[in-house]
Image (cartoon, rainbow, N blue to C red):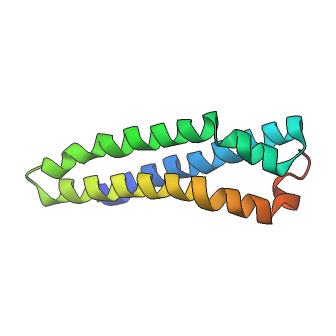
Amino acid sequence: MPIAVLSALTLGLSVDFAIHFLARAREIYKETGSVPETLDAMFDEPASAITRNALVIALGFTPLLLAPLVPYITVGVFLASIMAVSALVTLLVLPSAMVFLKRWVFKGA
């Protein structure tokens, strides 16, 4: 039960990374008008903020690895892993998808 509840919370945080990345990219694209320049700008402040946020949250769950109960250990591993993987996907896969789907991602921007 705790895994089910906390996984929904963690997935919500994970989706937040992607939403913030896309929203900020669209704002920068309005200023630059260039996808390569937009992605270069995205890997300054926004990417470092996402990385720091994911690290803080993932590291925040690691003390659960020292818990005496196995469900707490499972929750700690599960949530720290989801946060790390979601940050990596946001920073590696999402920009690639944005380049491939730029006509739809930056439509109206």
The residue lying furthest to the left in this view is 68
Residue at x 54%, y 41% (from the top left corner) = 50
The residue lying furthest to the bottom in this view is 100
> 26 above or below 7?
above
Instruction: Find residue 5 and report its horizontal and vertical position in percent.
Output: 37, 54
Which of the image's four quarters has the C terminus? top right
Write down the quadrant of residue 96 in the picture: bottom right
In the foreground, 103 or 40: 40
Residue 44 relative to residue 73: left or right? right
Instruction: Find residue 6 and report its horizontal and vertical position in percent.
Output: 36, 52
> 84 above or below 55?
below
Residue 23 visible, this orientation? no
Residue 24 relative to residue 107: left or right? left
> 17 above or below 95?
above
Residue at x 23%, y 60% (from the top left corner) = 74
Residue 58 visible, this orientation? yes
In the foreground, 22 or 100: 100
Residue at x 32%, y 43% (from the top left corner) = 59
Residue 57 relative to residue 102: left or right? left
